[in-house]
Image (cartoon, helix red, strand yellow):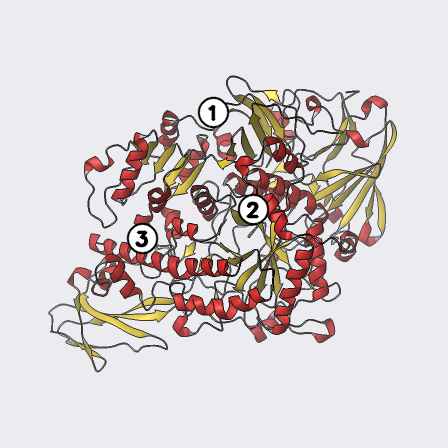
């Protein structure tokens, strides 16, 4: 049922040869030099460089050139900027009869497909990036065990009283002995609470006293020592390996994860993997090479670590290994801090800087998700050309905010973000409304380059059952998805906002100082992640208090303050922090003397990075607020907020968000409702400009400017998951509402909307414009419905769920609703509205991912549990999207609240023909297929992936399930 629709929607091949680098250059003109008028023109038709990219998964690698070309053409037709080539696990066994063949990674046939994809993509004007490996993290068959990710292994041997020797533990393949020590045993008290598992949890306390540790010498594989009258523990420190395998590897790409601290391990990968991939691009190198999130679980050691530690810190690490392992003392925290900082230096130099330099030498850019483990810091992101983030956790620590903040602080215009990673599981369940829900949240954090996760390559029709291939867990955004015909509308929406959020300069008022030195001091063997530590060091109530008080914020770290300062931030907030560099305190003090404001939550720092006490005078200039409850008022006393919500309603403060960009002659505000019910609020904007106009990201239109009140306040209404753009300037911006109603007749809620009315019409339009439509024509009944792929037409006296009929229970595709309506001359200025959506229980924000764990507490890279599955908690009146045609002309798409279109310019006096083309998801048809048997695939290639939430693959409501009305406004 899906195939017919896809064939109808396929584009024809374009003969235009577009010069790609000129498109990129034209779209990245210095924002500070771009006039508001030029910005408005580009907003109407957003440039290619601001449109979303897709991660293009090649599975197996069983790809064919005709299908490669067809999918590239579809991306172009969808308004997608380009694709990142990502090479993943096999989906099927070889089947010559169906032309399915898994090509080995880096084979000549595979590299020829890469060459073809980039050549054809460039002809279409598409940007092409490439992941510099298969699966993630970097590694594979060219990574030997000697160059694989390393770890410190500690073997403990219990030594009873009076015992004078202990046998050296047997070394495994590739392991080497570092040192040994003996320490007094320590009886641990029973734990009263269950200890959390996982690489982000606190490690188990040591069962020995590190202060009593003495070095041991080993002869003939035996350590000898004097007798003692109490039990002891012999400690053997061993340089080992994590032996982690590359996750989701393609055929021929299996192997160890490389050692990210090792210059040689990274150099080998660049030579053996990077060079062949980039050579396949010929004279047109990829726009960027990509490194996914650092997930080298448990990697905390490398052969030259002791030498590097000595060089950086001035003392030998080896005698302090018992303290490093045990923790719990000031001396141990100092050692852990210095160890962590050394690991950060090593990955900065040997992974990030080396790959970035290699990219420059190959005329490309290094796009890196510089977070996770091991050990990268906030300022590490400035070592790569394109720092990317991930994670829609808006009101808590997020690696997306981590990346946007770095780009703001270090003056980089574009922040890409891996988006829709866990969107509404299972695959093919995600809808355009789900996409908007996550995209808007990401925009609030400063993302301005959406990297869609993703686009599955799938073989041509008849080779695999519809809906085709998909990643084990992610949105499937290719044209096997029935609602795909509205994708150009979605990409235009994303492109317009992304473009605006690149203009001018970021204007976040608050900087939050990340306690990186505390994170390093909290490292322990197997737990060396700065971003992981921030999930507990940055209190979510503090983040919520900042946002709810009307401020937006960036993270910053001490290295950034020392190197580039605090920029245009007005307030620096210190979360509960113990350690801070003295030089950073001096920088902050100087900034405060120049007019900056600083405040500390809970307490001021008490230690320098080495754990030495700070003098009381060193932090005397920093006021303290006891907790997050008092933070909002304290911030307001320091500087007025950018976006003050003049409402006692805490719910509104929790769901309404904003981000501001400052131009030399204008302010840009993007405002979004992250909740699932409509909100109306009075907001005060911190702007000095005289005029305001509202720009519509759905269609690129601009309302006529109005004067800004002296109070700079405005009443704004937003639909569930609604958004708005306000442009403030001193020069009125001419309206671009060509062919549409005057501003006073834009579709919007009635002049007075009560709380009861809003609850009944949860999808009410987005803003109050003052005019009330004269009349409503009910069009809910007597539609002819044509299920195009079934060649079946029926008349519906009342609108009916497709799943109510056995004939359409498993239908996934398009249905065309059609009927005529006769209008008088004064009824042709109208909006088509579909009402009836309602909120669903649930939270609007996503929780972090919770991985499956190995017995040692580290994530199991071979197993993926169901992810957070962010989605819109909203039951729409249209399942899931629609395109409206009036008298044969496309009037627009309906894919998010408010489900309303101004159709005035398409209507005429007399009879009018209305068609609403409705599209659902692929789940209904997918459910009718027999369960897929993965056992033969697992038998040949191993269990490389686990499809998520297959129990949720079932028919879901489809079609128009609300009321349809034509709201007419008389002869305006």
From the top left corner, tell me how far across and down residue 673 is, in percent: 56, 34
- Identify the residue position indicated by label 3 in the image: 520
Look at the image and tell me whether residue 3 can be seen.
yes
- Identify the residue position indicated by label 1 in the image: 648
Q: CA distance from mark 1 to mark 2?
A: 35 Å
* Element under disc 2: strand
Earlier-in-chain disc, 1 versus 3: 3
Report whether 759 appears left or right of 358: right
Tags 3 and 2 in contact by the CB under 8 Å rule? no
Q: Residues within 10 Å of mark 2 (few under 14, many from 20)?
A: many
Earlier-in-chain disc, 1 versus 2: 2
* Element under disc 1: loop
From the top left corner, tell me how far across and down residue 356 is, in percent: 46, 57
Image position of 269 with respect to 424: above or below: below
From the top left corner, tell me how far across and down residue 514 is, in percent: 36, 44
Residue pictured at 70% horizontal, 20% vertical: 772
Residue 449 is labelled as 2
Q: Quadrant of residue 148?
A: bottom left
Q: Quick one: 72 or 425, which is closer to the camera?
A: 72
Tags 1 and 3 in contact by the CB under 8 Å rule? no
Mark in the foreground, 1 or 3: 3
């Amino acid at each position: 049922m899906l195939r017919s629709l896809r064939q109808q929607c396929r584009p024809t091949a374009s003969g235009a040869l577009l010069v790609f680098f000129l498109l990129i250059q034209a779209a990245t003109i210095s924002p500070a030099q771009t006039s508001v008028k030029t910005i408005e023109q580009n907003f109407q038709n957003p440039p290619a460089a601001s449109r979303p990219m897709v991660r293009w998964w090649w599975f197996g690698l069983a790809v064919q050139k005709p299908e490669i070309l067809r999918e590239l053409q579809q991306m172009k037709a969808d308004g997608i900027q380009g694709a990142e080539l990502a090479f993943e696990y096999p989906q099927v066994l070889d089947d010559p009869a169906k032309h399915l063949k898994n090509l080995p990674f880096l084979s000549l046939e595979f590299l020829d497909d890469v060459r073809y994809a980039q050549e054809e993509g460039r002809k279409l004007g598409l940007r092409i990036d490439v992941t510099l490996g298969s699966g993630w993290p970097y590694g594979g068959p060219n990574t030997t065990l000697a160059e694989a990710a390393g770890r410190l292994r500690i073997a403990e041997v219990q030594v009873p009283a009076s015992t004078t020797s202990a046998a050296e533990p047997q070394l495994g393949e590739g392991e080497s002995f570092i040192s040994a020590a003996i320490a007094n045993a320590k009886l641990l008290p029973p734990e009263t609470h269950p200890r959390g598992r996982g690489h982000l949890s606190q490690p188990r306390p040591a069962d020995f006293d590190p202060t009593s540790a003495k070095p041991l010498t080993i002869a003939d594989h035996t350590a000898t020592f004097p007798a003692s009258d109490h039990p002891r523990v012999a400690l053997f420190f061993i340089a080992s390996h994590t032996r982690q395998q590359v996750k989701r590897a393609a055929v021929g790409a299996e192997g160890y994860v490389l050692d990210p601290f090792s210059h040689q391990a990274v150099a080998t990968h660049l030579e053996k993997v990077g060079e062949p991939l980039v050579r396949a691009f010929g004279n047109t190198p990829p726009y960027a090479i990509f490194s996914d999130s650092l997930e080298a679980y448990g990697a905390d050691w490398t052969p030259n670590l002791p030498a590097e530690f000595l060089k950086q810190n001035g003392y030998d690490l080896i005698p302090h290994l018992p303290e490093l392992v045990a923790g719990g003392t000031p001396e141990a925290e100092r050692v852990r801090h210095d160890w962590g900082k050394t690991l950060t230096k090593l990955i900065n130099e040997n992974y990030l800087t080396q790959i970035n330099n290699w990219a420059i030498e190959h005329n490309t850019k290094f796009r890196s998700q510089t977070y996770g483990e091991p050990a990268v810091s906030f300022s590490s992101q400035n070592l790569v050309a394109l720092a990317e983030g991930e994670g829609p956790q808006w009101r808590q620590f997020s690696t997306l905010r981590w990346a946007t903040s770095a780009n703001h602080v270090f003056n980089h215009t574009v922040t890409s973000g891996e988006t829709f990673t866990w969107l509404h599981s299972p695959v093919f369940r995600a809808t355009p409304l789900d996409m908007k829900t996550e995209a808007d949240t990401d925009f609030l954090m400063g993302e301005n380059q959406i990297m869609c996760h993703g686009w599955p390559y799938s073989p041509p029709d008849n080779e695999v059952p519809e809906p085709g291939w998909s990643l084990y867990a992610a949105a499937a955004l290719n044209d096997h998805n029935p609602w795909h015909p509205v994708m150009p509308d979605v990409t235009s929406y994303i492109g317009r906002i992304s473009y605006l959020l690149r203009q001018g300069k970021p204007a976040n008022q608050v900087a939050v100082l990340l306690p990186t030195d505390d994170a390093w001091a909290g490292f322990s063997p197997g737990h060396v992640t700065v971003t992981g530590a921030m999930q507990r060091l940055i209190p979510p109530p503090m983040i919520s208090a900042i946002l709810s008080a009307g401020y937006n914020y960036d993270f910053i770290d001490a290295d950034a303050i020392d190197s580039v300062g605090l920029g245009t931030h007005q307030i620096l907030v210190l979360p509960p922090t113990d350690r801070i560099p003295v030089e950073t305190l001096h920088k902050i003090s100087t900034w405060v003397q120049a007019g900056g404001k600083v405040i500390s939550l809970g307490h001021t720092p008490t230690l320098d990075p080495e754990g030495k006490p700070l003098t009381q005078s060193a932090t005397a200039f920093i006021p303290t607020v006891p907790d997050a409850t008092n933070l909002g008022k304290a911030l307001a006393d320091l500087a007025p907020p950018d976006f003050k919500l003049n409402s006692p309603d805490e719910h509104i403060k929790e769901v309404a968000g904003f981000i501001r960009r400052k131009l030399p002659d204008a302010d840009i505000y993007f405002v979004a409702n992250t909740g699932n019910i409509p909100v109306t609020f009075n907001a005060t904007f911190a702007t000095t400009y005289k005029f305001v106009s509202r720009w519509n990201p759905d269609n690129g239109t601009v309302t006529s400017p109005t004067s800004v009140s002296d109070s700079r306040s405005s009443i704004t209404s937003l639909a569930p998951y609604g958004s708005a753009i306000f442009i403030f300037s001193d020069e009125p911006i001419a309206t671009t509402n060509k062919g549409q109603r005057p501003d006073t007749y834009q579709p919007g809620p009635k002049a007075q909307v009560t709380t009861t009315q809003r609850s009944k019409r949860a999808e009410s339009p987005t803003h109050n414009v003052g005019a009330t439509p004269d009349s409503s024509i009910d069009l809910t009944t007597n539609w002819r419905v044509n299920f195009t792929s079934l060649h079946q037409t029926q008349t519906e006296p009342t609108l009916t769920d497709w799943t109510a009929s056995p004939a359409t229970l498993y239908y996934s595709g398009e249905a065309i609703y059609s009927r005529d309506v006769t209008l008088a001359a004064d009824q042709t200025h109208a909006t088509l509205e579909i009402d009836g959506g309602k909120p669903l229980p649930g939270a609007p924000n996503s929780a972090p991912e919770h991985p499956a764990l190995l017995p040692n507490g580290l994530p199991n890279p071979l197993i993926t549990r169901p992810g957070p599955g962010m989605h819109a908690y909203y039951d729409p009146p249209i399942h899931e999207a629609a395109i409206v045609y009036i008298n044969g002309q496309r009037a627009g798409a309906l894919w998010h609240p408010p489900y309303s279109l101004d159709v005035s310019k398409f209507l005429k006096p007399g009879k009018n023909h209305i068609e609403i083309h409705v599209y659902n998801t692929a789940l209904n048809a997918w459910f009718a297929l027999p369960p897929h048997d993965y056992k033969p695939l697992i038998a040949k290639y191993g269990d490389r992936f686990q499809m998520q939430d297959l129990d949720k693959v079932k028919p879901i409501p489809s079609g128009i399930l609300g009321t349809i009305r034509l709201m007419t406004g008389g002869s305006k």
